[in-house]
Image (spheres, helix red, strand yellow):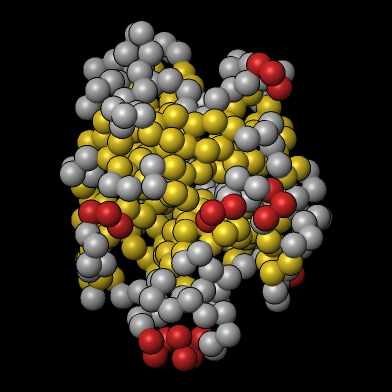
Amino acid sequence: MTLLFLFCLVVLSTAAPLDLLQRRGNLPLAVSSSEFLGTVHSTTTYVLRDLGFQGKIGNTTFLTYGDTLYSNASYNTGFLGMTSDSVALATDDPLQVDDVNLNAQGYPEQFCPIEAKWGEEAATDAMGITNVVETNPGEGILFFLKNHRPNGQNTLIGAGVATVSLSSSNVPNATRLAEYWWDANTEPWYGDIGALRAGEYVYAYGHATSANHVYVARVNYTQATQLDSYEYWNGQAWQSDRLYNVSDTESVMWGVDQDNFMDNKIMASVSYSPTGPWSDAVMLYQATPITAGGNIYSAVPHPYYDASGETLVVTFTNEPNNIQAVKVVFN
């Protein structure tokens, strides 16, 4: 299963009981139909990659990716190079994106940078990134998770924040504020699942090393670049003290994962509050792996294609490194 958790932000109330919230809207979701659209490709380069989180600054919609493998027009070449992340701009077609950060060879540059000043090298270090969140006009942030992975052996180091800005020609740039803020061994990896802005706050969701639960931090969007301004959900209330060695007590959800334990079903849960409670999970789409024993992961909502909410484009990664899209119609 890959679980896509969606927020209904009509009512943001942690005090109301679930039965009252259900009377204010449709919990859980009711799906009328779903349609497979195809595989997502760039209009400006040839790459294979995964993830594809969506975010916006102003009228510009960004898609942020994980491992990005350089390829050719047939998508069947050997290794030509790669970055551990990249960024593209959305188009009106869910199956087409525009890469604008290209190197001299015409391939995407690393977006969230690898920094030599922190002893990092592209051959051994990677930045896992999620979606861009707008904080001020023309400015935003994204959360990253530093991964030290020599010889393919992953060691997560810590999570942090990068600022995102746009050039006059609409080219995005990311700048990390620190090597990392939250230690991956003892603290949740805030933002590693994704982030959203609701009201005055940015909410950042992430796993932790101890369990498959989800934890959340929040910050006023005007102070998102200040570590001391973040608050942490302890299971009952927000606190300014950081959380260490967390358990299920502090979590807001269980089971947002990339594993294949529910037969490649893309599921969705809904909440009217950033901390839950959540509706029962509903299947949006039954995906089919393109390789035997393959995995479907990283389901991402793309609500900007239909502001009415009557339909929703969802992308997911079909292992290995093929991003595909479906359109879901709700009752």
Check the image and report above or below for 27 versus 113.
Answer: below
Q: Position of residue 309 (x, y in %)?
A: 26, 67
Q: Position of residue 58 (x, y in %)?
A: 32, 48
Apparent side of residue 301 relative to residue 240 in the rendered image (left or right): left
Quadrant in which the C terminus appears: bottom left
Residue at the image point whose x is 60% and y is 66% from the top: 253
Q: Position of residue 54 (x, y in %)?
A: 38, 46
Residue at the image point whose x is 23% and y is 54% from the top: 305
Residue 170 in view: yes
Q: Pick the residue in front: 260 or 326.
A: 326
Q: Where is residue 328 in the image (x, y as percent from the top left)?
A: 26, 61
Residue 288 in view: no
Kindly give the residue lying farthest to the left in the view shown: 92
Apparent side of residue 99 relative to residue 209 in the rendered image (left or right): left
Quarter of image, res 132: top left
Residue at the image point whose x is 69% and y is 18% from the top: 117
